[in-house]
Amino acid sequence: MMAVKNSELSVTILGSGTCVPSLKRSSCSALIETGGKKLVFDLGPGTMRRLLEVDNRIFDISFIFFSHFHPDHTGELVSFLFSSKYSGKEQRQTPITFIAGRGFAEFYNRLKMVYGNWIELEPGLINIVELDNKNYDSIRFNEFTVESIPVEHNDESLAYRVTSRNGISVVYSGDTDFSNNLVTLANEADLLICESALPDELKVKGHLTPSFAGKTAAMANVKKLMLTHFYPECDEVDIEKECRKTYGGELILAEDLMTIDF
């Protein structure tokens, strides 16, 4: 039986890692629950298993948000759709909404060219919403509001801000380099889930490090910062110490299956 959440908003880390295979960390993904709805952010390898580990079925998910289209963030989409049709006696009965930047509909259509009707659900069971990947965008649902803004990674890359009906806000950075847009989107957020792919000394274009993530959080004046999307090199250094060069607030280092309630 599924656990009942009594909090205004709950965040569970489904994956805190990257494309590198790991027994400790699945690919970067997060589950946000608010207003009775379950929202998954990114769908890389290992996400569906992690959902089961926190007592959620794939049929319980109402929305999936994609930060961008790299395989470690979309790689389980085909399996998710396939399972929604052929999971034994059970099939999806309620619509699933995919939200992403411009180009996602074409991305999905190209997957159908490969897999055909194996990943095509019944009419009305899939909704696709493409947000503006050049400017700020927003969409309001009955239970929550989602804002998005482009960040520095791929052309389609978006960061998201989810706000509950009572004003609790969580920002999911997706993959990004340092971005003033992310600072703007995360302003005064209750939680910033921020990628911190590599230690400071191994900084690469398109990704943040602990000190750059800390700088983002400090500039945005967020209440809590959670670092995630760790490559194995992060396990060999003091990530918290590096982040503290730029950020003095509440800091959390993500682990798979970690939950935070608001």
Image (spheres, rainbow, N blue to C red):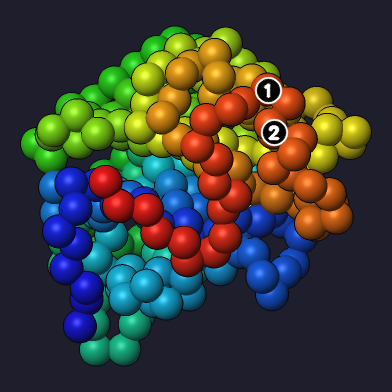
Residue that label 1 marks: 246
Q: Residue drawn 30% across and 32% down?
A: 169
Q: List the single residue furthest toward the right.
A: 201
Q: Nearer the viewer, residue 31 or 187?
A: 187
**CA gap, disc 1 and disc 2:** 6 Å
Camera-side residue of 255 and 93: 255
Please say if the residues under marks 1 and 2 sit with CB atoms less than 8 Å apart: yes
The structure residue drawn at horizontal position 32% and vertical position 76%, both measured from the top left corner, is: 55
Q: Secondary structure at mark 1?
A: loop
**Is 1 situated left or right of 42 in this image?**
left
Q: Position of residue 133 (x, y in %)?
A: 48, 19
Type of amino acid under label 2: Cys
Q: Residue at x 60, y 50 (%)?
A: 253
- Identify the residue at horizontal 69%, vertical 42% (top origin): 240
Q: Position of residue 250 (x, y in %)?
A: 50, 37
Identified by mark 1, the residue type is Thr
Please give left or right for residue 40 compared with residue 42 in the image.
left
Q: Nearer the viewer, residue 36 or 108?
A: 36
Which residue has dot 2 on it?
243
From the top left corner, tell me how far across and down residue 201 is, in percent: 90, 33
Left or right placement of residue 34 versus residue 156 in this view? left
The vertical placement of 172 against 40, above or below, is above
- Where, by quadrant of the figure, is residue 127 drawn? top left
Q: Is residue 163 left or right of residue 36?
A: right
| Secondary structure of residue under mark 2 | helix
Can you name the residue that lies furthest to the left here? 142
Residue lying furthest front in this view? 248
Q: Please provide percent x and percent y for residue 139.
A: 24, 25
Q: Can the viewer see residue 132 in this picture?
A: no
The local crowd at label 1, few if under 14, some if 14 to 19, many if 20 or more residues have their Cα within 10 Å, is some
In the rendered image, the vertical position of residue 152 relative to residue 71, given as above or below = above
Can residue 247 be seen here? The reply is yes
